[in-house]
Image (tube, helix red, strand yellow):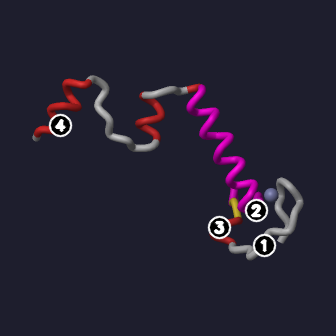
Amino acid sequence: MICTLCHQEIHEYHPELHQLVIDETHTAHVCSDCITKFFKWQQKLYAKLFPTTAMKKMFGQDIPQDKKEYHKKRIS
Ligand SMILES: [Zn+2]
């Protein structure tokens, strides 16, 4: 299978790992390298556009915003 993005052969192709289904008629095959690049690109972009609060929500990190709250949680 050839990667839709970089046109290189996808080694050890696996549909669950490499097949991106957009909708019923659009499917892309993406190699691991391109997935990693895409992911890093999006991470950087989101970190830049939505620093702190939005990122924490997005990645499910339960970090209270002020130290008082954080301290309370640690004690209890
Ligand atoms: Zn690729």
The C terminus, quarter of image: top left
Q: Residue furthest left?
A: 76
The residue labelled by disc 2 is 31
Q: Secondary structure at mark 2?
A: loop
Q: As displayed, is residue 30 above or below residue 70?
A: below
Q: Ligand 1: does it lie within 8 Å of the C-beta at label 2? A: yes
Q: Nearer the viewer, mark 2 or mark 4?
A: 4
Q: Amino acid at mark 4?
A: Lys
The residue labelled by disc 1 is 11
Whichever of labels 2 and 4 marks the residue nearer the N terminus, that label is 2
Q: Taking the image as four quarters, which one is ligand 1 found in?
A: bottom right
As for residue 63 lying within the magenta part, the answer is no
Residue at 23% in and 31% down: 70
Q: Amino acid at mark 1?
A: His
Q: Nearer the viewer, residue 15 or 10?
A: 10
Residue at 42% in and 36% down: 56
The residue labelled by disc 4 is 73
Q: Residues within 10 Å of mark 4 (few under 14, many from 20)?
A: few
